[in-house]
Image: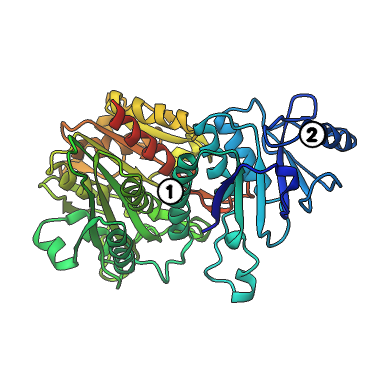
Amino acid sequence: MTALATTSDVVSSIEADALILGILGEGEITAHAQLPEDVRAALTASAAALEPSAKVGSVTVFVHPDVAAKRVVLVGVGEGSDGDLREAAGAASRACGKEPKRVVIALPALTDAAQEAVGEGAILGAYRFTSYLSSEAADDAYSGAEWIVAGADEAAIARAKIIAGAVAGTRDLVNTAPLDLYPASFAEEAEDLGHRAGLAVTVWEPQQLADEGFGGILAVGMGSSRLPRLVRVAYKPKGAKETVALVGKGITFDSGGISLKQNDGMQTMKSDMAGAAAVLHILIAAARLELPIAVTGWLCLAENMPSGTAQRPSDVIRIHGGKSVEVLNTDAEGRLVLADGLDRAREDNPAVLIDIATLTGAQGLALGSQTSGVMGTPEVRDAVVAAATEVAEPMWAMPLPEHLRETIESKVADLKNTGDRQGGMLSAGLFLREFAGTTPWAHLDIARPAFNEGSAYGFTPPGGTGAAVRTLIQFLHNREEA
């Protein structure tokens, strides 16, 4: 991953491929303790003819003789909030030339939190997924660059590296082709990464899933030749007073099963495991940050394929814990694997239970491509949204209207796996609530935000985004301080 460091040197004298500076207000370059005033004035005067914008992420590039760097990258920082700075650093990182080896960032980050935001933005904006490129093409990525945040606190830089690393790791898994990432290989990756981070990892193989009654995961995965898995990843520091359980949807490819999707509906379905990927890397980050709160992650892994062994519409399956579900649409499979995960996770008596899933197309219709929906017990739901606000990740609190509960009632089973199309995100949340029991709980629907089908913006690249990772790390941090 991209290296991140800090410096106390005068930034205009550092030889680098690029020097990133901010623009605030009337096209004036923002002040920085390590940028001499006469150099800042000269740069501002030279840049005036280019009419640089203060709009967050707007980039202007030029060269100047008073700067040792090969180019100056000016980026709009809006009002200069932590969120604005993170977006700005990400946008600027893509304008630093081909194969930059060193980039110096002198944005107006006056607090540790702001410096951390700049570091995160720089790393995440520079992110490239190169696993399937030729070695020559892969060398063009920014992964070998050193990004230097001028004047930053070492602790802020260390934290930024861990959090950005968790987001980048999630993106890598989401971007991996389903030919290579399937339930067994995902479980192996979780074991490898988890053990390296000092986490306890347990994997349920197919027979054990059957023996212990995980009917949702088995039903979704039985149409594939690549059978499902359940993975438990646990971080438990000494003295931890409570446990937060995270449950991630891990459909490594979603064809829709017998209720087959149209072709264009399948093209991004390698991303249907983004919730499980987020959970894994949140656990790794928690360990590396040495958070004093215990966290348990559950990765519900299956591949949803049509075949002679696949589940059928009108099948009735039994979820872990005993509740029966009538399957009316095999493409509403995420809630089935999550039901197993939620029921099993609450057996360990966590203080809080949160599930993360690319669950419904209705989420995108209601909230668009960047804003996740959050439902659940009001205090947990609102705490998640508050954490999202702190890290400037768009999330919105959604209700669970009781009148929609009847839409998931079945005539032949305890529940059915689909409700009315109107309010589909909410009826899916009501379905999951049935398996959270009395445990304080929240459900994050990240269906559209988890995968960017358009062009890069801010620190967000095309493809996997790492949705919910920063928010839930902040949520854990807030629990630790409460």
Residue 162's disc number: 1
**Seen from this angle, which residue lies furthest front?**
9
Query: At x 31% / y 48%, what residue is drawn?
Result: 287
The three-letter code of the residue at mark 2 reads Arg
Residue placed at 73% from the left, 55% from the top? 17
| Residue at x 44%, y 38% (from the top left corner) | 363
Amino acid type for the residue under numbered disc 1: Ile
Residue 86's quadrant in the figure?
A: top right
Residue 445 sits in which quadrant?
top left
Q: Secondary structure at mark 1?
A: helix
Above or below, comparing residue 235 to residue 376 in the picture: below
| Residue 444 left/right relative to 143 | left
Q: Can you give x and y, in whole percent of width and height, for residue 32 in the image?
A: 68, 32
> Going by the image, does 294 lie left or right of 357?
left
Q: Nearer the viewer, residue 193 or 67?
A: 67
Q: Which residue is mark 2?
A: 40
